[in-house]
């Protein structure tokens, strides 16, 4: 089990790198700013928890750093969960596993944004949704691909109906 968790954490880190690369490429191509949502979520969570970050110099930098770390934690944690599911026999084909992994990560990232009132995804435009979905799809494909390939299940058919390669 611990190997599966470790494999998933490594896969999630690789997927997080892919997500960041795709998001930064989008920012470079379209000239859009980075999202302030991670910082806003951290600000709300720390305030609700009774430990708001102190005002003053450096506060914005702390929020930015903690927001990025929260994103890494979601990516690594999602990888661990998906790896445990894969170990338990949940092994869809690579394309579907990648899409589902990306959808799970996107849900885990966007749910706090909605729940804490940082943003309302129901009001997002198609461009906003695309800018969120494509990096998460990249995350899912890389993360699931690493998990499946580490277990010998990277082919289009996954691990077959018996949960073994082939």
Image (cartoon, grey):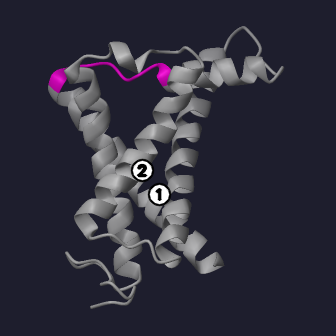
- Answer left or right for 72 relative to 139: right
Main SS category, magenta section: loop
Q: Position of residue 124 (x, y in %)?
A: 31, 17
Secondary structure beneath dot 1 equals: helix
Instruction: Please name the residue shown 48% across and 21% down the image.
Output: 37
Over which residues does the magenta segment extend? Answer: 30-37
Q: Are marks 2 and 1 in contact (CB under 8 Å)?
A: yes
The circle drawn on residue 13 is 1
| Nearer to us in this view, 146 or 64 | 146
The quarter of the picture where the N terminus appears is bottom right
- Answer left or right for 2 relative to 135: right
Distance in Å between CA atoms under marks 2 and 1 = 5 Å
- The answer to whether 43 is drawn above or below residue 72 in the figure is above
Q: Mark 1 packing: few (<14 Cα in 10 Å), some, or many (20+)?
A: many
Instruction: Please name the residue shown 32% across and 68% down the image.
Output: 145
Secondary structure beneath dot 2 equals: helix
- The answer to whether 2 is drawn above or below residue 107 in the figure is below
> Is residue 55 at all visible to an observer of this figure?
yes
The circle drawn on residue 16 is 2
Q: Is residue 31 magenta?
A: yes
Instruction: Please name the residue shown 46% across and 73% down the image.
Output: 86
- The answer to whether 109 is drawn above or below residue 158 in the figure is above
- Count of numbered tags: 2
Q: Position of residue 18 (x, y in %)?
A: 33, 51
Instruction: Please name the residue shown 51% across and 73% down the image.
Output: 7
Q: Is residue 36 magenta?
A: yes
> Is residue 53 at all visible to an observer of this figure?
no
The extreme left residue here reads 29
């Amino acid at each position: 089990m611990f190997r599966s968790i470790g494999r998933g954490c490594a896969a999630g880190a690789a997927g997080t790198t892919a997500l960041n690369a795709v998001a930064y490429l989008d920012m470079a191509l379209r000239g859009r700013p980075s999202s302030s949502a991670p910082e806003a979520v951290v600000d709300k969570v720390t305030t609700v928890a009774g430990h708001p970050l102190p005002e003053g110099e450096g506060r914005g930098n702390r929020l930015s750093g903690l927001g990025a770390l929260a994103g890494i934690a979601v990516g690594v944690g999602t990888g661990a969960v998906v790896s445990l599911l894969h170990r338990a026999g949940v092994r869809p084909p690579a394309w579907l596993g990648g899409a589902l992994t990306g959808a799970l990560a996107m849900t885990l990232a966007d749910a706090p944004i909605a729940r804490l009132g940082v943003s309302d995804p129901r009001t997002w435009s198609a461009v906003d949704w695309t800018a969120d979905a494509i990096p998460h799809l990249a995350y899912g494909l890389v993360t699931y691909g690493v998990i499946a390939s580490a277990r010998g299940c990277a082919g289009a058919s996954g691990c077959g109906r018996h949960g073994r390669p082939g």
